[in-house]
Amino acid sequence: MTRGAQGLARVAVVVRAGAAPLWWLGVFAAGIGVLVPGLTGRRIGVMAGAALFLVTAAVVGGARRKRYGELTRGAVRAGKQDVLQDRRVTVRNWRRGHRWWLVLGFLAALGSAFVVPAAGGLMLAGAGAGLRLKAGWIGRAEQSGDALLWVRVDWLSGRGGAPGGKRVKAYRSTGVAAGDAAPGGGRRAVAARV
């Protein structure tokens, strides 16, 4: 990197990075949890899990929206010297930084099945769904503003997350064609070759 250049990661990609692992670990834990009768029984466990799924998805999806909105409105244009981090690298950094939290969450969801079958797994899946919803909300903000949002890598947490945390002072913005991720953090569709 040249002097004065900053490494930038896509905000929506950082938010979305945990969605898939949380979703699949939660679904897997819920599937195993249904096999365990538990103290409350399967029916109550699944009903409680469905309620926890909805509540968790709503809470995670809506958390810190005011902070994200403030940072979005205050976004400044990225400089030519700034280095845009690939989507793959951002996702890998988040998942490496959170791997033990993911393992602990999965084990806790499995353990909770002995009390309330499937509920812990569905709650974990709800957290993944909530992150996906939040990334989608950021993507809609990017589309309406016709600009992609980026955050300095050195302002992220030590685990590669928290794009709306206290360390983040401002977002940077680029045109919608920058980087290799679409608005919302998903993979950018590649045009078919003729």
Image: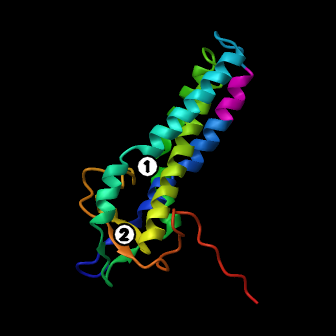
- Residue designated by label 2: 8
The residue shown at (37%, 50%) is 65
2 relative position to 45: left or right: left
- Residue designated by label 1: 97
180 relative position to 30: left or right: left
Mark 1 vs mark 2: in front: 2
Q: Main secondary structure of the magenta part?
A: helix
Query: Which secondary structure lies at badge 2?
Result: strand
Is residue 164 in sight in this rendering?
Answer: no
Give the answer, above or below, for where 74 lies relative to 56: below
- The residue nearer to you, when weighing 142 against 5, is 142
Give the answer, above or below, for where 89 lies relative to 78: above
How many angstroms separate mark 1 from mark 2 (CA)? 17 Å
Label 1 neighbour load within 10 Å: few <14, some 14-19, many 20+: some
Quadrant in the picture for the N terminus = bottom left
Is residue 15 in sight in this rendering?
Answer: yes
Asked which quadrant contains residue 116, the reply is top right
The residue shown at (64%, 43%) is 24
User: Magenta residues, as a range?
Assistant: 28-35
Residue type (three-letter) at the residue carrying disc 1 = Gly
The residue shown at (35%, 55%) is 68
119 relative position to 83: left or right: right
Label 2 neighbour load within 10 Å: few <14, some 14-19, many 20+: many
Residue type (three-letter) at the residue carrying disc 2 = Leu
Q: Are marks 1 and 2 in contact (CB under 8 Å)?
A: no
Q: Which percent across, then down, holds residue 42?
A: 71, 17
The residue shown at (43%, 79%) is 175
Q: Find the residue positioned furthest to the bottom.
A: 194
**Is 89 inside the magenta-drawn segment?**
no
Q: Find the residue positioned furthest to the front.
A: 144
